[in-house]
Amino acid sequence: STYTTAPASACPMAVGTFDAGSTSVHAKAQARTKVASNWALYVFLFLLPLQNIHSAYLPNFGGGLNFLNVGFALSLLGAWIVRGRIAPNEPVNRWVAAYAVYSVISLFISYQYVSNTGTHANILKDHLTGVFMLYLVQMSVNDWTGVRRVILATLLPLPYIAKVTWVQHIRVASWHCSDNLRIKGTFMLLGANEFAAFCVTMAVILFALVIAAKTSRRWKIVLIGGMACMIVGIMYAYSRTVYIAVILGLLTVILAWRGRWKLMLPLLLVAALAPSLLPTSVVQRFDSTTVDEGQRDESTEMRFEFWKIAWDNFLSHPVAGTGFQSFRHPEINPYQMDTHNVYLRTLSEGGVIGGVLLLGVLFSVLHAARRELSAAPSGSWRYALALGLVGAWMGMVCGNLFGDRFTYYPVIAYFWTYVALVVKARHLPPEIPAPRPRP
């Protein structure tokens, strides 16, 4: 068929109507692209791992008016202002909500079995604050500019963390490995293991972003710099579990990456040169890792003792356990120490119900990451974030076998931040392809 077009002068009303309509649509499209940013969240993210600063220098007025509570409240207000939404129909959101509800129930259960529970509610509040970054970040991100700003906010504190770590290391440095070398960076209220676990999460995620995201040279430099800062923390925290966790995390990223063949030669070189490049004390610490009976050090030996107590307590209270934070109390554990295994502690304190909910949370995170790996195009931020989350998930699951990498908010807040970015990614507008470099 043939179509004819009348001259503009023949239908002035039609032309005028079309122009006005197209201008209106264009204006609305531009308005939609200018999405407000949650600046309170960016500041909150920047300060979260700097426990030495907000514990020693930021005021605590009592009555809940401290950095963590006020920062979370302001960030939540910012999320409401930008009118963000939680991603709909995401299993991880439902599992985390169920986990949080049962954690509150478990808090009240603990009152029946142990005494001196005055700090339990505050510990749970701090723990759930870190977990609820999953919702807060989803509500604050409405486009890919917001995603990159969140990533940048998590990158900015890393050089300072590396500097603090290096200064602490220089003060205690020695040729051979000893417990005096255990430093905790900016995590002044926690320990070396928790600090190193945070570094593993960030190092693995940044590694995935470097190799899998097609982005500008400036971004590559920033991402590589952040990864180098975290490697400093991993090496000089002297955590044997973390050494294994970071290896498993990086291997998971490489095996899951669609372009893994590109890294074969560099990996062979790193494997060949690493033993000669690492400090002798680091190599000695790694070599001391063993679980063979008769060759275990005191720290490893005591873990087996704690695990036996936790398992016996679970068998005595298999359904709902003895309640949140009950294992440290003398009524349950005469050593008054943590289990150094999140899964056994969850069974002891939460019973089968708590164990099922914890596994549901962990596997829902893995499901979300694997789904994005299959659906997202190679080279996109969406794909690279999912790839990094798969590796970070493996590192965290491994780390929790020999310690607590799940309860403390400075350790897990960034992990849940990146879970939120992966979950929200599929609900955002398509990414704008990065411009090709000029020849």
Image: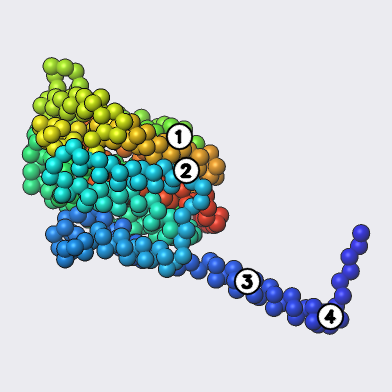
The residue wearing badge 4 is: 11
Query: If you read the primary sequence from the N terminus, does the residue marked by circle 2 or circle 1 appear first?
Result: 2
Q: From the image, which quarter does the N terminus lie in?
A: bottom right
At horizontal 55% and vertical 57% (from top left) the residue drawn is: 429
Q: Give the structural element (helix, strand or loop) at label 3.
A: helix
Residue occupying the far front of the picture: 112
Residue 418 disc label = none
Real-space Cα separation, disc 1 to disc 3, in angstroms: 41 Å
Q: Give the structural element (helix, strand or loop) at label 2.
A: helix
Query: If you read the primary sequence from the N terminus, does the residue marked by circle 1 or circle 4 appear first?
Result: 4
Q: Give the structural element (helix, strand or loop) at label 1.
A: helix
The residue wearing badge 2 is: 91
Left/right placement of residue 434 relative to residue 126 reads right
Q: Quadrant of residue 204?
A: top left
Mark 4: few/some/many CA within 10 Å (<14, 14-19, 20+): few
Mark 2: few/some/many CA within 10 Å (<14, 14-19, 20+): some
Real-space Cα separation, disc 4 to disc 2, in angstroms: 55 Å
Q: Pointer 2 and pointer 3: residues touching (CB < 8 Å)? A: no
At horizontal 33% and vertical 48% (from top left) the residue drawn is: 131
Compared with 74, 7 (above or below) is: below
Query: If you read the primary sequence from the N terminus, does the residue marked by circle 2 or circle 3 appear first?
Result: 3
Compared with 120, 251 (above or below) is: above
Q: For the image shown, how many numbered marks are present on the structure?
A: 4
Of badges 1 and 3, the one in the foreground is 3
Residue 26 disc label = 3
Of badges 4 and 2, the one in the foreground is 2
Q: Amino acid at mark 4?
A: Cys
Q: Amino acid at mark 3?
A: His
